[in-house]
Amino acid sequence: MAALARWCVRYRLVTVLLWLLALGGVSVAAAVAGPAYSNDYEVPGTDSGRATQLLRQGFPGLGGDSDTVVWHTEDGTVRAADVEQTMTRALDRIEALPEVASVTSPYKGQSAQGGQGGQSTDRISPDGRTAYATVTFTRPAQDITEARAKAVVHTAKEAQGDGLQVELGGGAVGAAQSSGGHLAEILGVAVAGVVLLLAFGSPAASLLPIATALVSVGTAHAAIGLLGHAMTVADFAPMLGMLIGLGVGIDYALFIVTRHRRGFKRGLGVAEAATNAVATTGRAVVFAGATVCIALLGMLILRLGFLNGVALAAASTVVLTVAASVTLLPALLSFIGPRALSRRERRRLAEHGPQPEPPTGFAARWSAFVERWPKLLGALALAVVTVLALPTLFLHLGTSDQGNDPASSTTRRAYDLIADGFGPGVNGPLTL
């Protein structure tokens, strides 16, 4: 580790340029190749997997994704002639769109008396204010392009107006929705920057952990996009990798920067302090990163195909953050030099010279207190953890659906309209 850190400090400009070249090259390659994520959650050998295969074999063209168009009116009912004409035209246009196999409309089905040509009462709510149609695509949701799904949404939304609300739900429609950007991640990074600035007192030192994490996570994010062309990678894998990478990346870099600053205060030079930090704390960072990777790769033994890509994507992000922490970070530390310390710390060092840094503050006092009462505090900690873990005995596991989507999304509004108009269970039909 010391030799690696020494090389990165000596050839700091080359190290930084290599990382920037990797970030730019992988990002360009990912942009050219385009995304190829696949939300294929089918598990071979299960009842649902066999049912899907039977449906595809017995009804070619109808084994694709099924989405829902829901409409609701506050004035009158959906059986009104103007509402029926408006929605019938919209559904006919949807059925004519590419990759749409069929549209099952409540206005074209079995009548309440069983005759042909009446209204299908099971798709109209008891109060007559809500109705829905099923749009069946020719392909599964993960194979439907965003443009095709948005064409269905746009065509349906054109019917909205004059007291008529139209919403859509389903896998293809949900995948075509905007994720809302990365506002949460941006806020998280900003808060981390403020905390680091308060802790270090040096803007340069507080920015280095963030910069290191952003470069490594950015490279990993683009690499995950390329990985989707080689194997099945779910569309949430980049987000998962980003969250894990930012967390461990800032954390690992923070350890090394802290050790580097202590070396400065002891009188070490820039290169020697950076090398010493990587040779000591860097080893712990590599070990911690390897532990995280092993835990993530444990998903491979579950034998669930869609998790394999997620495991590799998250593990590769951690690998790159560790690599950046022990190579890019010492190079950046050598660039900022004494500015790793705050102005007050540099002034004190210049006036009084290197001095030992005895442990002080709340952390030192708390450590001494724990050392004096290890058994008592250990038992107390075990009791607290046990109490906090009790809710797991009553945990009900399940899969989230579009009822968990943001309230402003069309999928969530469609889900709520169906739940309010038809009652529980309609949003989760069982296919036999």
Image: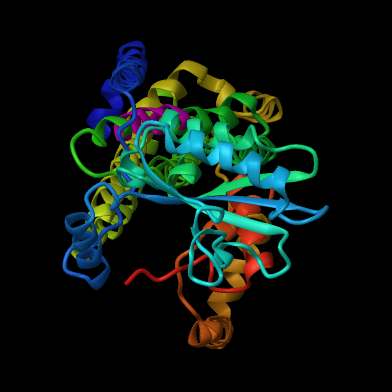
Q: Quadrant of the C terminus?
A: bottom left
Residue lying furthest right in this view?
Answer: 75
48 or 216, nearer to the observer: 48
Can residue 263 be seen in this snapshot? no
Q: Residue at 37% of width from left, 37% of height from top?
A: 321
**Location of residue 52 (image quadrant):** bottom left
Asked if residue 161 lies left or right of residue 109, the reply is: right
180 or 190, nearer to the observer: 180
Asked if residue 30 is positioned above or below residue 14 in the image, the reply reads below
Q: Which span is picked out in magenta?
A: 214-224
Asked if residue 334 is positioned above or below residue 110 in the image, the reply reads above
Q: How is the image coloured?
A: rainbow
Q: Residue at 62% of width from left, 46% of height from top?
A: 167
Instruction: Name the chief secondary structure element in magenta.
Output: helix
36 or 314, nearer to the observer: 36
Q: Position of residue 284 (x, y in %)?
A: 34, 50
Q: Quadrant of the N terminus?
A: top left
Q: Is residue 24 highlighted in magenta? A: no
Q: Is residue 223 highlighted in magenta? A: yes
Q: Position of residue 101 (x, y in %)?
A: 35, 43
